Each structure stands twice: as C-alpha cells, then as structure tokens.
Image (cartoon, grey):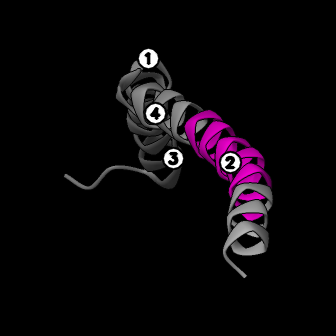
C-alpha cells in the first residue's frame, strides 16, 4: 500500500521538526564562538602591548645610539 502525498508531507514535516529541534538544542558550537571571542581579545591585548613596547624600545635605542655616537 502506498502512502498518499499528504501522508508523505506530514512524515517529512515530523522528521524535519525533529531534526530542527535537535539542531537548536545542540550547544557544542557555542564553545567555538567563545574561544573566538577570547582569541580576539588576546590578540588585541598583545597588539596593544607590542605597540606600547615598540615605542618605548625605539626611544631607548635612540638614547643609547645618541650616547654611543
């Protein structure tokens, strides 16, 4: 016996609903987003530190060069 088109559509809707509910309740992707935010913050902090250190080193080496030269 073959299912009618309406029964096939209802079965598809039920399976689709099950899949979508399982996808929506899966929280494993949230950890990736959290790690990405942490990494972006860490990169910003490193870049700010390098920029501040770079300016200080340039001044220090300039003073040393002036004393030696």
The CA distance from mark 4 to mark 1 is 20 Å
**For marks 2 and 4 on the same chain, the one whose residue lies earlier in the sequence:** 4
Labelled pair 4, 3 in contact (Cβ < 8 Å):
no
Q: Which of 10/32 is in front?
A: 32
Q: Position of residue 7 (x, y in %)?
A: 44, 41
Front tag of 2 and 4: 2
Pick whichever of labels 2 and 1 is earlier in the sequence.
Answer: 1
- Residue 27 position within the rendered picture, expressed as x and y whole percent measured from the top left: 41, 21
Instruction: Read off the residue under disc 4.
Output: 35
The residue positioned farthest toward the bottom in the image shown: 69
Whole-number angstrom distance, CA of label 2 to CA of label 1: 46 Å
- Disc number lying in front (4 or 1): 4
- Mark closest to the chain's N terminus, 4 or 1: 1
Q: Which residue is mark 1?
A: 25
Looking at the rendered structure, which numbered label has been put on residue 53?
2
Front residue (pair 6, 22): 22
Question: Sequence-wise, which precedes: disc 2 or disc 3?
Answer: 3
Residue drawn at the location 54% of the way across and 30% of the way down: 38
Question: In this rendering, would 39 be left or right of 14?
Answer: right
The C terminus lies in quadrant? bottom right
**Which contiguous range is marked in magenta?**
40-58
Which label is found at residue 54?
none
Residues under labels 2 and 4: Cα distance?
26 Å
The image quadrant that residue 12 belongs to is top left
Whether residue 3 is situated above or below residue 28 in the rendered picture? below
Q: Residue at x 60, y 46 (%)?
A: 43
Label 3 vs 1, first from the N-terminus? 3
Q: Residue drawn 71% across and 74% down?
A: 65
Residue 9's mark? 3
* Percent position of residue 49, x then y: 67, 41
| Tags 3 and 1 touching, CB below 8 Å | no
């Amino acid at each position: 016996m073959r299912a009618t088109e309406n029964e096939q559509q209802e079965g598809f809707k039920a399976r689709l609903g099950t899949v979508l509910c399982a996808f929506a309740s899966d929280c494993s992707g949230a950890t990736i987003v959290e790690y990405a935010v942490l990494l972006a913050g860490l990169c910003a902090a490193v870049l700010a530190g390098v920029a501040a250190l770079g300016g200080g080193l340039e001044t220090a080496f300039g003073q040393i060069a002036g004393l030696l030269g």
